Image: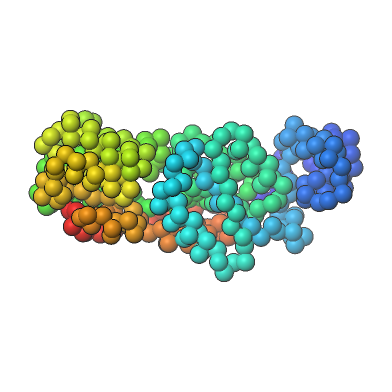
Amino acid sequence: MGRQRPGAPTLEEVAAHAGVGRGTVSRVVNNAAGVKESTRRAVQRAIEELGYVPNLAARSLAGRRADAVALVLAEPDWRQFAEPFFSEIVRSLGDALADTGMQLLLTLVRSDAERQRFLEYARGGRVDGALLVSVHAGDPLPDMLAEARLPTVLLGRRSGDEHISYVDADNVGGARNAVSHLLKRGSTAIATITGPLDMHVARSRLRGYQEALAAAGLEADPSWVAESDFTQESGRRAMAELIRRHPEIDGVLAASDTTAVGALEALRAAGRRVPDDVAVIGFDDFPLAEQTEPRLTTVRQPLEEIGRAMVRLLLEEMQEPAMAWRHVILRTDLVVRESA
């Protein structure tokens, strides 16, 4: 962050391209007052055409930090924002930043236009770093921010080979332990309801399910897998489909607590008793898990610790931009309640 790449355009080149003075470009980059709108647009157009990246480190040394961090929710489906996961992660990140004196700015990025708009916002020095949540496979925003040299930390990752700092839970291990628990208590016909499979978190939990079955000498047949989008309604639909495909089902791992609630509804509607007929395990350990009937056995992912780790990595990257990307994976725990 803050050093122009070899061959990268300079402030002077942007000024020449826009036909203005260097000071005018500086004022536009710093979002200062006193620049005509037409001039501001000309400078912004030159910045975009040349691919100029503002020297954020110099701004910091000059005492011009924004003292703000963007929490970017990169989720195209509006319904997801009603899920407990988002409120819990916003709370944990807000708590982690509480003593830093920095503002947490919530930003929704759901389209290419919104990605570009946020990139320009960040390039303007209005935030000192970004925390990205709910990033799907193929989303270019983390790479765009890395190219702009904005300190960035992901919650989770897009793939197993992520070239950005991230903090994640042990999703594979958590799912594997959950299915092993179902096997130990006597379940033999175990299904899983995944999250969206264009997300690494969902694929990881599916992998844990498959590994546990394989370790027990059981085949992970695709017909025992139903995809959801982490919502309650999708969990209900997926569970109903699994019952239709496999009436003998006696255990299920749902990829989130909210999905598990939908699964419980479908099982109840089908006359199946939990856990006598079908044992159910969720993933998250939100307060919701204590409110279901029966109370939900679930895999706890440590969101408070995740929030603290994300903020710590981001602050360290802001202070030492040249440091290597860090990948932190935190342990999960199985919380056993009545549903399994």
Q: Is residue 287 left or right of residue 40?
A: left
The location of residue 1, given as percent across then percent down, is 66, 50
Place of residue 324 in the rendered image (x, y in percent of width and height, measured from the top left)? 54, 52
Q: Nearer the viewer, residue 75 or 212?
A: 75
Q: Is residue 114 left or right of residue 301?
A: right
Q: In this rendering, is residue 179 above or below 16?
A: below
* Number of numbered tags placed on the structure image: 0
Q: Residue at x 77, y 38 (%)?
A: 44
x 14%, y 42%: residue: 271
Q: Quadrant of residue 200?
A: top left
Q: Position of residue 155 (x, y in %)?
A: 46, 50
Quadrant in the rendering for residue 305: bottom left
Q: Is residue 189 left or right of residue 62?
A: left
- Could you say which is closer to the camera, residue 250 or residue 262? 262
Q: Could one spot residue 103 in this view of the protein?
A: yes
Residue 225 in the image: state x and y as whole percent.
25, 35
Measuring 89% from the left and 39% from the top, which residue is drawn there? 20
What coloring was used for the rendering? rainbow
Left or right of residue 327: residue 281? left
The residue shown at (38%, 53%) is 169
Q: Is residue 14 visible?
A: no
Instruction: Depth check: give the residue in front, 332 or 114.
Output: 114
Q: Residue furthest bottom?
A: 99
